[in-house]
Structures are given as structure tokens and as C-alpha cells.
């Protein structure tokens, strides 16, 4: 079978080479499809590129899902097993929530976010949500 995304394969090979001397646990890689106002009609589905992305050296992987075109991409992880040591970045989200909480207070963050879909993660960051 031919590579459906040869340019991306090459980019990832170049990235892996460029960071070859950096410990993987010290790196995070953010994957996104851009933030343009144009429709994202030509974006590949995460399912189509996830195997390629998992060959990246960084152990931390962050995927965009704020764009409505990709809001469903989380479901890919039902069928894809992360390699040993690799992880998604809920702690990056947690870090950002803690930054806000340190400025405006935990209670204000809790009130603003208590209905978010990442409720278990939110609870682990700012405490009991009840």
C-alpha cells in the first residue's frame, strides 16, 4: 500500500531527526489542522494519520479538538492503543486551568468549567466538584 500522506511522513522523519538528542520525555508535540477561518474540508481525519503520528519521538501528544470539524476526533482513542510511555496531554490542560485558578481563584474556575466534558480531569486538578 502506498503512503497516503508522503509529505507528512517526510516531515515527521525530519522532526524525529532534528530532536534525536532530546529525551522523548522532555518533549510534547502538538498536532493541529490550523486555525483559519476557512472550512476545514480537506483536513485528514485523525484516524487516517494517527499511526504515523505515534511514530514521533515526543512522549507527550496534544491534539486539537476545539475546531468543530475535529471535535469528534477523541473517539479515535477508543480503538488506538498508545505505545508504552506515550501519553495524551490532559496535564497540559490541567496546567492551564491551574494558571487561571492561581489568578482568579479555584472556585471561579470550578464554576466556569464544572459542565465541561473533562470533568474527571477537572476534579483531579481543582478538587471536588460538588
Image (tube, rainbow, N blue to C red):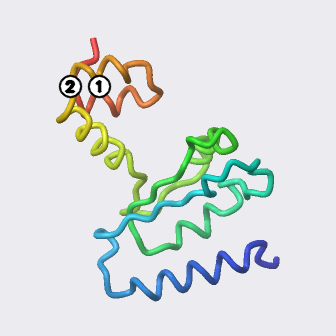
Whether 130 is drawn above or below 97: the answer is above
Helix, strand, or loop for circle 2?
helix
Q: Which residue is situated farthest in the front direction here?
A: 37
Q: Observer-nearest residue: 85 or 15?
A: 15
41 vs 15, nearest the viewer: 41
Quarter of the figure with the C terminus: top left
Residue 25, compared with residue 124, is above or below; it is below
Disc 2 designates what residue? 106
How many other residues sit within 10 Å of disc 1, few (<14), some (14-19) or many (≥20)?
some
User: Cα distance, mark 1 to mark 2?
Assistant: 5 Å
Q: Element under label 1? A: helix
Q: Residue at x 58, y 53 (%)?
A: 80
Determine which quarter of the picture holds residue 25.
Answer: bottom left
In the image shown, does 38 or 121 lie closer to the viewer?
38
Q: Which residue position is annotated with label 1?
A: 109
Return the x and y of residue 53 as percentages of the image width and height: 56, 67
- The image position of residue 36, as x and y in percent, is 66, 53
Around disc 2, counting alpha carbons within 10 Å, would you say few (fewer than 14), some (14 to 19), or many (20 or more)? some
Split into 4 quadrants, where in the image is the N terminus?
Answer: bottom right
Vertical order, 66 against 27 (above or below): above
Position in image of residue 117 (x %, y %): 47, 27
Residue 44's spot in the image, x, y percent? 73, 58
Whether the residues at callouts 1 and 2 have beta carbons within 8 Å, the answer is: yes
Amino acid at each position: 500500500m502506498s503512503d497516503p500522506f508522503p509529505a507528512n511522513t517526510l516531515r515527521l522523519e525530519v522532526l524525529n531527526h532534528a530532536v534525536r538528542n532530546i529525551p522523548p520525555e522532555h518533549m510534547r508535540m502538538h498536532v493541529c489542522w490550523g486555525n483559519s477561518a476557512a472550512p476545514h474540508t480537506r483536513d485528514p481525519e485523525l484516524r487516517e494519520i494517527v499511526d504515523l503520528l505515534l511514530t514521533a519521538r515526543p512522549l507527550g501528544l496534544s491534539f486539537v479538538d476545539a475546531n468543530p470539524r475535529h471535535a469528534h476526533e477523541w473517539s479515535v482513542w477508543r480503538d488506538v492503543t498508545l505505545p508504552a510511555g506515550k501519553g495524551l496531554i490532559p496535564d497540559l490542560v490541567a496546567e492551564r486551568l491551574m494558571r487561571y485558578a492561581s489568578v482568579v481563584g479555584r472556585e471561579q474556575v470550578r464554576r466556569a468549567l464544572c459542565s465541561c466534558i473533562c470533568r474527571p480531569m477537572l476534579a483531579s486538578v481543582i478538587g471536588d466538584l460538588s
